[in-house]
Amino acid sequence: MTMRHLIRRPLLLALFALACVQGTAFAYVTDGVSYAPMDYFIFRAPVVGASYLDPAFGTSIKRISDALDWPDAADSGNLTLITNEYATMSPFNSDNSRILVQHQSYFALYDGNGNYLRDLPFDVTASSEPRWSRLDPNVLYYHPWGNRLERHDAATGQSSVVHTFSEYTEISGFGESDICFDGDHLVLVGDNRYVFVYEISTDTKGPVLDVGGPGLVDGVALTPDHNVIVTWYQAGPSRFSGVELYDRDMSFLRQLTTAAGHLDVTRDVNGDEVMVWVNAGDPAATCPNSVVKVRLADGQQSCLLSLDWSLAAHVSAPDGNGWVIVSTYAPSDPGPLGGWTAYTNEILQVKLDGSEVRRLAQHRSRPFNGYYFTPRAAVSRDGSKVVYSSNYGSQAILGAPSEYSDVYLIDLTSAAPSSAGSVDPVATRVEQDTPVAAYAGAWYTNTNAFHSGGSAVLAMDLGAQASFAFTGTAVSWVGYRDQWSGIALVYVDGVLKATVDTYAATAQPQALLFSTSGLAPGIHTLTIEATGAHNVASGGSWIWIDAIDVVTRLEQDDAGVGLGCPVDVTWYTNSVPLHSGGGAALATNPGCRATFSFTGTAVSWIGYRDQWSGFAQVYVDGTFRVEVDTYAPFGDAQARIVTLSGLAPGPHTLTIEVTGRHNPASGGAWVWVDAFEVHP
């Protein structure tokens, strides 16, 4: 590596850090590895109002609705369906103080934190396409009765007529269009045939495009500069096919794509109008089944993210912060034990220059109906919040109706990059200059604020080694990756475990480079060896060591663990070698509790699962966090039942309470406590 490269490295890291130092409201992973979801067939969503951390990526997710326990205000009984309407119109008002949520056939208002406020008038229906004003956070526009556009003031509860389009029987936006970026224009379609732009402030209807009849156009959208996108059902390079662009006077400008697909519009960071489009329907695509950015000025396409053919996706774009939200879904309903491809059933944040994909959450919605299982994640106009819908597989887990779904909220106000599976397991970090580290060969120190602990070491000579002695059951190597990084060998207790290529096209400080778990309790040695080799894309063979993460485990009989039950019932001890430390505790009576006092920011409950295991409720510091079904169709020893992280530094108490309940497949309600893992 030249001195010029060493000077450039801090600059690259500085650019990375600007996006990462603001806080920890949500976590994400940026690799392309497949992560099968934990407890896919038994995982239950938190209660309404509660949050949990996504087990794969660490993002905090809040459940904001409870359809099955909410009265249907427009009918008898309870609701079965609460959902956000669609991806391409924002359910958030202009200052994010309210969220528009669909309750079966009508709409309700929630505050910006996801708390229910009240129902809207029943003429604000699913077919009336309510759209928030961008100029007044209290106002929304909708078309309740055929050809009439109305205005509703959410502060006063009053509605008024804006315009009646008497020349048509009905008007619509085809269900997917939003109000224009200036808040003053809507694209509407009269009688499913006549497309025009309406200006609210002047009460003016623009020139009309006659598409030739109903059933020929799939969708319309307004661009930031008031141009109109028309999506035709017909595909091909000829006129009136694929996706076409018109000006606000409905004069044809150009064809953008030859095939329809889910899409949304925004501005690029340089101000260009762009469309973000899923190109699965394009047989001539250079990057098949991908999320693609299309520049409206000339139709130039840039591939942002390629997906497996088993996946479909929706797109939701904010007003121009350089990112879009993509929500994928798998109509084939794959299982996590086989065929689970990368990005399956995920909420993603994709950068418009294609340089980064942030994997935020696994939405866990399964295709138990034809449409409403899709998450259709929708972002606020400033890009700070996202809502999505999910059934969490509850039709199979809880016997929910087929049309069931609820709504979930993610706050994106700060970004905290996370190692894959960062909440599973949790670990104690040991820096590279720890006294237990032993180095052989030529290693160099790089001091930089963006490394863990402010420094890291690097080597590139064949045979240079670094060894770390540790006590634990799992260990990870944290290092630095960039365009000049090479290939390393990794050994555990002298046994070769992996050959790791640490090259990356863009700089990645504090990257997870290797991880292994399931080690026997006791002392182990991790050894990392430089090979002097690199792949053809890399300009060097540098191997970086920044830190190692070691899992610390405490057994169920530790002094910090308390086991208690109601009078005349008890926890039982099971002593067999398959348990951590050779023993575990179990109980089946409702009200039996295991409490674990610890000091740290995250904790994992390790237990046993089998055909006779039941439900448990988990609390942190007395606050309910999640109900867990511990049933498994076969014995699963030392299973990580649940991990809770993002806790404030300091002392906490984890409580596991036996419910006495079990799912229909289980023969009992036993709950097992084997061990705990803690992150300081």
Image (spheres, rainbow, N blue to C red):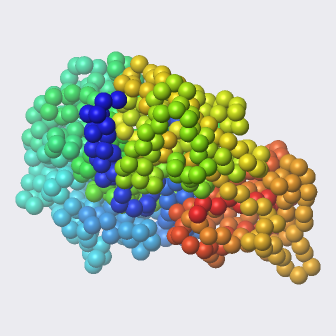
So how many labels did they put on this image? 0
**Quarter location, residue 120:** bottom left
Q: Is residue 88 left or right of residue 364?
A: left
**Quarter location, residue 456:** top left
For the point 27% across and 39% down, which residue is it? 7
664, 33: nearer the viewer: 33
80, 31: nearer the viewer: 31
> Which of the image's four quarters has the C terminus?
bottom right
**Quarter location, residue 465:** top right
Measured as percent of width and height from the top left, residue 133 is found at 23, 62
Measured as percent of width and height from the top left, residue 377 is found at 42, 50
> Which of the image's four quarters has the N terminus?
top left
On screen, 199 above or below 512? Answer: below
**Is residue 647 something one can see in this rendering?**
yes
Q: Residue furthest bottom?
A: 567
**Is residue 213 something one can see in this rendering?**
no
Measured as percent of width and height from the top left, residue 272 is found at 16, 40
For the point 39% across and 61% down, which residue is it? 23
637, 426: nearer the viewer: 426
